[in-house]
Image (cartoon, rainbow, N blue to C red):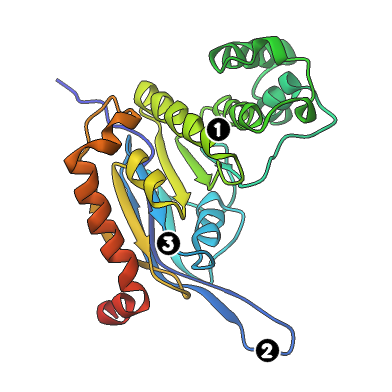
Amino acid sequence: MTTQTKVGHLKAEGLRMSYQRKGREPDVVLEDCSLDVEPGKLTVVMGASGCGKSTLAYNLAGYLKPDAGRMTLDGESITGPGSDRVLVFQETALWPWMSVNDNVMFGPVARGEMSDAEARQAALKLLERFGLRDFRDKYPGQLSGGMQRRAEIAQALINKPRVMIMDEPFRGLDEMTRELMQEYYMKLFEETGLTTLFITSELEEAIFLADRILFMGDTPGRIVRTIDVDLPHPRTFEVLDSPEYLALKREAMAQLYVGVEGLEELA
C-alpha cells in the first residue's frame, strides 16, 4: 500500500540577504536565517516591523536572490519565481483597468497553461466560491477592501500553487473585516490543506491561524524560536476564550518581550 506524499515542503537554510546602499556599508537584513515549512500546514512567521519578514517572503517567492544560503521546495532548488509558489502581497496586486474576472484568469493565460475559455470558466468557479460571482465584471476600485483580498486569493489559487506565501495580506483592513478574512482563510485552509506561509506582526492573528509560529529576531533577522499551536480544527474565534489559547498567548508574549536579548542568547 502506498501513501500519498503531501506537496509543499518549503525549506530555507542559512539565508543571508543584504541591500547595498550607495556610499555606505551594506545593510544586512537576513543572517543565517533557516526555516522548515511542513507540507499541509499553516506556518506563521511573526516579528517586529522591520525585522526582515517581507524580505524573507520575497526570497522564498523567488523575487529576491539571497547573498548566501539555499531554498528548496519539495527538495528542488528555488532559483526564481514560479507558479508553484504564489505570493499575496500587503498591498493590492489587482490591475485596476481589468475586471475582477480578467484579473483572476490572467496568470494561467499569460503563461499559456489555459485557453481563454478554460481560464474564464476556472475563474468564474473560484469567484463563485469566494462569493464574488456577481462582481466578476466590476473593477477592483468598485470593491471593498475585504472583497479585493478575496479576489486576490482567487487570483492566486487559479495557479494551483503548492505553497501560498502571504505577506501581511490583511494589513490595513478595519478590525471587523480583518477578523472576517482571518476566519475566511482558515476555512479555506481547512478545506484544501494548502501549505501556507503567513507573515504577520499581529499576535492574535498568528495564534488563531497557525499550526506553528516561527519568531524572527530583530535585524538582521533569523528564526529564534518555534511554538507549536495545538488548537482544535475546525477553528473559529470561539477558541480565543479557551485556556489553551490564553496559555499560548502568554508564551508568545514572553518570547516577544525577549526581543534582542533572546537573539543574543541564541547566537
**Where does residue 58 sit, x and y in percent of width and height?**
57, 55
Question: In the picture, residue 38 is in which quadrant?
Answer: top left
Label 1 vs 3, first from the N-terminus? 3
**Where does residue 89 sit, x and y in percent of width and height?**
61, 45
Alpha carbon distance from label 2 to label 3: 26 Å
Q: Is residue 3 above or below residue 224?
A: above
Q: Which dot, 1 or 2, sits closer to the camera?
A: 1
For the residue marked with disc 1, what is the amino acid?
Answer: Thr
- Residue at x 61%, y 32% (from the top left corner): 149
Q: Is residue 181 in sight in this rendering?
A: yes
Given contact means CB atoms under 8 Å apart, are the residues at marks 2 and 3 in contact? no
Q: Secondary structure at mark 3?
A: loop
Q: Is residue 109 in sight in this rendering?
A: no
Q: Nearer the viewer, residue 70 or 1?
A: 70
Q: Nearer the viewer, residue 53 or 234?
A: 234
246 with respect to 209 (left or right): left
Q: Secondary structure at mark 1?
A: helix
- Residue at x 18%, y 42% (from the top left corner): 244
What label does residue 47 carry, if any? Answer: 3
For the residue marked with disc 2, what is the amino acid?
Answer: Arg
Which image quarter is the N terminus in? top left
Binning the other alpha carbons within 10 Å of mark 2 as few (below 14), some (14 to 19) or many (20 upward) gives few
150 with respect to 211 (left or right): right
Q: Nearer the viewer, residue 46 or 146?
A: 146
Label 2 vs 3, first from the N-terminus? 2
Question: In the picture, residue 198 is in which quadrant?
Answer: top left
Pointer 2 residue: 24
Pointer 1 residue: 177
